[in-house]
Image (cartoon, grey):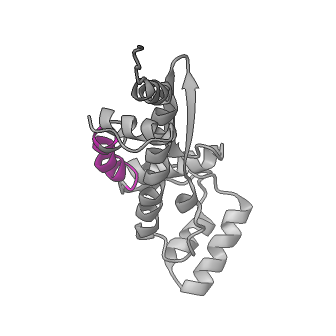
Amino acid sequence: MGITVDISGALKKNEMLRNIPAATKKQLTRFATDIIQPLRDSAAKLKRVDKYRKSSGALFRSPGYKVGMTGNQYYAMIGTGVGSGSKMAEKYARIQDTGGITRPTVTPRMRKWAWYMFYKFKEDKFKGIALTKKQKLLVRIPASHWFTSVWERWLPLLKTTYLNEKVIQDTAQRMSGGGTTNA
C-alpha cells in the first residue's frame, strides 16, 4: 500500500514563477515597441512650417527604444535618438516638441541658399537673410507636443495593460509551456 502525490501542478507553477523576470522584460519590450509607431505617426502629421523644403524624415525616424537591466530592475529608455545615438535627432525633436529659439550661424552657404530662394519664390525675407550683417539669426519654433501628447496617452497603459500582475503571470505561464492562469 502506498501513497501517490501528484506534484505536476506545483512544478508547472514553479516554472511559471521562474519566468516572471523574463515575462516582465518581454512586456516592457512590447510596450516600447508598441509606442514607437504612434510616435512616428505623430511626427509624420506635423504640418511643416517651412513650405519651401521637403521633409527629410529625420523626425519620423528619430523615435527609438532600448531595454536593459540595472541591478535587479529592468528599464526602458524611449525617446528620440535612442538606439541611433543621434544627438542631432534628439535636439531637433525636442525643440519641435517643446518649442523654443534657435540661433543658426549665418554662413556663406546659407547666404547662397537665401539668394536661391529669393529668386525662386520672390519673397523678401530671403533677401533679408542673404544681406544681413548679423552673424546669427533668431528663429522661433512653436511647440507642437508631437512626442509628449503620445507619451501622456500611453503611459497609463504601461501599468494597466502591459505590466499588471495578471498579464505578467499569463506571459510567464505561456513561456513555461502552459496556458493562461486563472488567478
Please state, as top left, top right, bottom left or bottom right, where the C terminus lies in the image: top left
Picture quadrant where residue 55 is located: bottom right
State the residue at coordinates (44%, 56%).
Answer: 39
In the rendered structure, which segment of residues is drawn in magenta? 146-160
Above or below 173: residue 141: below
Residue 149 x, y percent position in the rendering = 32, 52
Residue 27 x, y percent position in the rendering = 44, 41
How many numbered dots are placed on residues in this image? Answer: 0
Q: Which of 31 and 179 is in front in this view?
A: 179
Please state, as top left, top right, bottom left or bottom right, where the N terminus lies in the image: top left
Magenta span includes 157: yes
Q: Nearer the viewer, residue 94 or 17?
A: 17
- Residue 101 in view in this figure: no
Magenta span includes 29: no
Residue 153 x, y percent position in the rendering = 29, 50
Above or below 117: residue 161: above
In this image, 67 relative to 183: left or right?
right
State the residue at coordinates (57%, 73%).
Answer: 127
State the residue at coordinates (42%, 56%).
Answer: 141
State the residue at coordinates (40%, 29%).
Answer: 9
Magenta: main secondary structure equals: helix
In this image, 108 relative to 14: left or right?
right
Question: Residue at the right extreme?
Answer: 108
Q: Which of 15 and 68 is in front in this view?
A: 15
Q: Nearer the viewer, residue 44 or 124?
A: 44
Residue 67 x, y percent position in the rendering = 55, 36
- Residue 45 in view in this figure: yes
